[in-house]
Amino acid sequence: MELVPEVIQFASPKVMAARIADVIEAELSRSDQSSIALSGGSTPAALYQALSERPCNWPDVTGILVDERWVPPTDKGSNEAFVQHTLKQAAAANMSLQGMWRADSTPDNAAQTLSDEVAGIASPLDVVVLGMGSDGHTASWFPYADGLDVALSHEAPDVVAIKAHASNITGDYLDRLTLSLRKIQEARRVFLLLSGVEKMRTFEASLDDGPVEEMPVRAILRTRPDLWVCWSP
Ligand code: 6PG
């Protein structure tokens, strides 16, 4: 029988953020050097703000991005800027945060460079924080995207360039960089953060036995049934 991740339901985003921050704080304190991969979007904001106030040994914590839209940190859609403004503050101000944007490069060339850099930072990652779109994507694994097959392959490099098909979820951000399935599934702890009824409906649909390409979040749900699926209203 296939294992299915349990959903941990919380009373509010604030309660969910505090509980996950407790666990991540303990994970990041396990060793002298620790690493965390951080999704952008919006759902993780409460978690990142809660984490930023925790007394982790932040100078020894290396943060990388789970994925990035191919835009500079000055762009309103930048995941690096989102993480900078929500997590890399307060007690966490002196954590290191590696972005994925490279002004003098292309997504494909940047993916190759970043793969080497990320592999050198943390293998395996200690913690990964994922979100999920209402289309069933996670990271930047968008349904039927160009490069999705590479991102989900067992031989994938750490970082892959993706070109999503335009949708109301992608907006104008079609060129993406993303950690591969292999890199995420190797992590010690993986958290998937969901908020609201629509995301719960999407999550429930992702548990069907449809193709991974249709709802790529299925790739990590099926390879890491132990991940924490955390939901709040
Ligand atoms: C991004 C994010 C992405 C995010 C989902 C959910 O670049 O958009 O990293 O993978 O986790 O799109 O986003 P929300 O949390 O905003 O719903």
Image: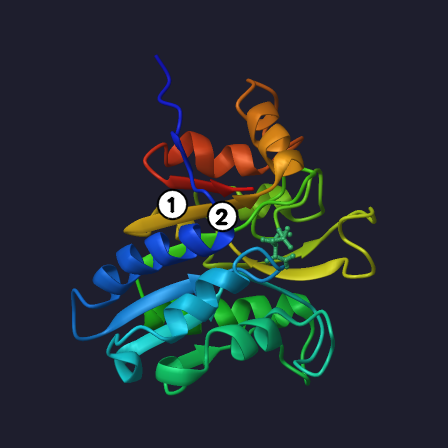
Position of residue 95 measured from the top left corner of the image (x, y, whole percent): 37, 82
Please indicate whether residue 229 sits to the left or right of residue 101 in the image: left
Q: Can residue 203 be seen in this view?
A: yes
Q: What residue type is labelled 2?
A: Ser
Position of residue 90 measured from the top left corner of the image (x, y, whole percent): 41, 84
Residue situated in front as seen by the camera: 16 or 68: 16
Q: Mark 1 points at which residue?
A: 185
Crowdedness near tag 1: few (<14), some (14–19) or many (≥20) residues, C-alpha within 10 Å: many
Asked if marks 2 and 1 touch (Cβ < 8 Å), the reply is no
**Residue at (77%, 57%) from the top-left corner?**
174
Q: What residue type is labelled 1?
A: Gln
Figure quadrant of residue 8: top left
Query: In the rendered view, would you say 49 is above or below 211?
Result: below
Figure quadrant of residue 106: bottom right
Numbered mark located on residue 12 in the image = 2
Camera-side mark, 2 or 1 = 2
Please indicate whether residue 62 sits to the left or right of residue 44 in the image: left
Where ligand 1 lies, by quadrant?
bottom right
Position of residue 36 measured from the top left corner of the image (x, y, whole percent): 37, 65
Please indicate whether residue 142 sits to the left or right of residue 156 in the image: right
Residue situated in front as seen by the camera: 145 or 34: 34
**Residue at (81%, 56%) from the top-left corner?**
171
Instruction: Measure how far apart labels 2 and 1 are at the Cα level.
Output: 27 Å
**Residue at (63%, 44%) from the top-left corner?**
148
Query: In the rendered view, would you say 37 is above or below 5?
Result: below
